Amino acid sequence: CKKYDVTVAKSGNMITHHQYKYYDENGKHVGSKFRRTNDKEFWSEGDLSGCGLFGQNLFNAGGKYVTICEGELDALSAFEMLGSKWPVLSIKNGVQSALKDCKANLEYLSKFDNVVLCFDADDKGRKAAQQVAALFEPNTCRIVHMTDGKDASEYLQGGKREQFSQAWWNAKVYTPAGILNLADMGDGLYDEGEYKTCLYPFDGLNEKL
């Protein structure tokens, strides 16, 4: 929370809501999102339309890795579980805004060697990850496959830091549908098969074919 300047409001000892601050390209705080804890409802104040991704103001463009999550709380969780070594960001308005948000900040994101997508482990998250991954140059975008939780926050709250780190490191390079990555084929690349079709009326030709 300190790193991302996230603040919380309390009523007695209970946290009532979080505040996630958003900044424009000049580093000016121009808007905020709020998350109510009891029902997970969101609302916003200010103008978020011209803002970068959540957390983008904290990290210079370029480097070995940048991770993009589906929500602000997931970004905080992933950053903590990965040892606070590399930038972790979040899209602005849920999975439906993923493609639009990443496309608007493509110049910034493309300066990293590896873009790691860590969207929720559901159908919408997987579909959005495929759409966003197609924006980047071949072999630069990886997609995290989470099996021990729905999102990064769930991993952290469940004490599954090691499992999340392993899933992150095992993230597979995105390849478009119908295209095979040779590195994934292994020895199968050299397997030969015999396939018979309708024979010609010429024995010599059949033998050669």
Image (cartoon, rainbow, N blue to C red):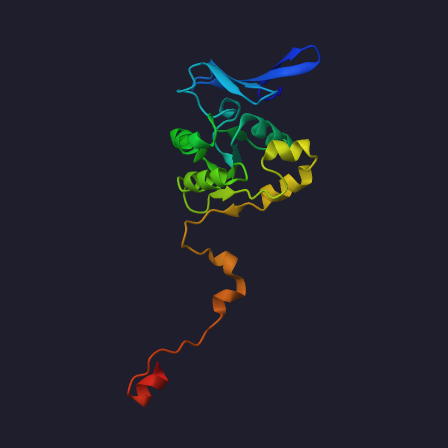
Q: Where is residue 182 in the image (x, y as percent from the top left)?
A: 47, 58
State the count of labels.
0
Q: Could you tell me residue 161's position as x and y percent? A: 67, 37
Residue reaching furthest to the front: 39
What is the x, y in percent for residue 23?
47, 18
Compared to residue 124, the image places residue 198 above or below, namely below
**Any part of residue 121 in sight:** yes
Identify which residue, 154 or 118, lies in the foreground.
154
Image-based side of 192 in relation to 146, left or right: left
The extreme bottom residue here reads: 203
> Which quadrant would residue 146 be assigned to in this image?
top right
Residue that sits furthest to the left in the current view:
201
Residue at 52% from the left image edge and 47% from the top image edge:
172
x%, y% of residue 13?
A: 71, 13
From this view, report whether residue 195 is shown above or below residue 23.
below
- Decide which of 55, 110 is in the foreground and name it: 55
Q: In which quarter of the image is the N terminus?
A: top right
- Identified at 33% across, 80% down, the residue is 198
Q: Is residue 114 visible to us here?
A: no
**In the picture shown, does residue 94 fall above or below 150?**
above
Identify the residue shown where x is 67% and y is 31%.
157
Choose top left, top right, bottom left or bottom right for residue 130: top left
Indicate the quadrant containing the C terminus: top left, top right, bottom left or bottom right: bottom left
